[in-house]
Image (tube, rainbow, N blue to C red):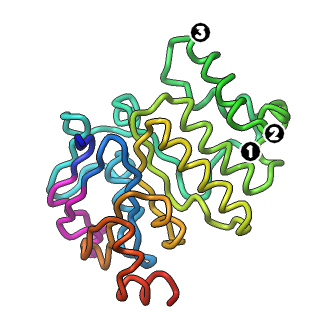
Amino acid sequence: MRDILEIKNLLYSYGKIRALKGINLTIGEDEIVALIGANGAGKTTTLHCISGLLGNFESGSITFMGRSLNGMKPHEVSKSGITQVLEGRHIFPHLTIKENLMMGAYLRTDTAAINSDLENIYGRFPRLKEREKQLGGTLSGGEQQMLAIARALMAKPKLILMDEPSLGLAPMIVREVFQIIRKINEEGMPILLVEQNSKAALSIADRGYVLENGEIVMCEKCEDLLNNEKVHKSYLGG
């Protein structure tokens, strides 16, 4: 399997605090890769370095489909084929569902394909179709998360970064969201998943990285991580 994203020796600091200490990470073209760890371990920082939201990092490299992302602005990273679903969803509360979805396609110019993709999205998320004229801010937390994922798909990405998609959701809705993520991957979309609910993340991912204090301390198949005593004690509540 070909790697589409490769991070090598990535260093990033907030002032004098080093958040990432030379991490290495890869994502294959058909994979869900889970990045787990405690709060403050550097998970979101990793995503923001990839998507360009943090600007230049100190050293290291990020390569996507053979092209360096070093120094790219967020819109340039998006144009290259990477879309991020931010923690907290960050939909536009005063825009309708349809307007939110169309914002996901703002860098695209293929009008016919955009309209076709919109119909496909509505087929995948029928609740969004039923409420397409409803303001995003009036949706439930689970519906907003679905809208955020759907908006990311409207960008026609080659890789999706997801940051805490289960945050603040009821357990039943969490299961539904993770089923959606798995289905998207089964249809060919690679995903880098940052998730505090480690057990849920590892249950749908192919491989997992464990991040502790800015360092990758473990990288294994998720089946092995789920059965690892240290991982179980530290991150799976057992």
As drawn, the label of residue 93 is 1
Q: In which quarter of the image is residue 213?
A: bottom left
- Quadrant location of the N terminus in the rendered image: top left
Residue at 64 percent across and 16 percent down: it is 115
> What residue is disc 3 on?
112
* Residue 144 within the segment the image draws in magenta: no
Give the main secondary structure of the magenta stretch: strand
> What residue is disc 2 on?
135
| Residue contact between numbered discs 2 and 1, judged by CB atoms under 8 Å | yes
Compare marks 3 and 1 and give the one earlier in the sequence: 1
Say if 133 sits above or below 11 in the image: above
Residue 68 is left or right of residue 118, and the answer is left
Real-space Cα separation, disc 2 to disc 3, in angstroms: 25 Å
Residue in the foreground of this view, choosing between 97 and 196: 196
In the image, residue 22 lies at what x, y percent?
17, 66
Amino acid type of disc 1? Pro
Amino acid type of disc 2? Leu
Question: In front of the other: label 2 or label 3?
Answer: 3
Question: In front of the other: label 3 or label 1?
Answer: 3
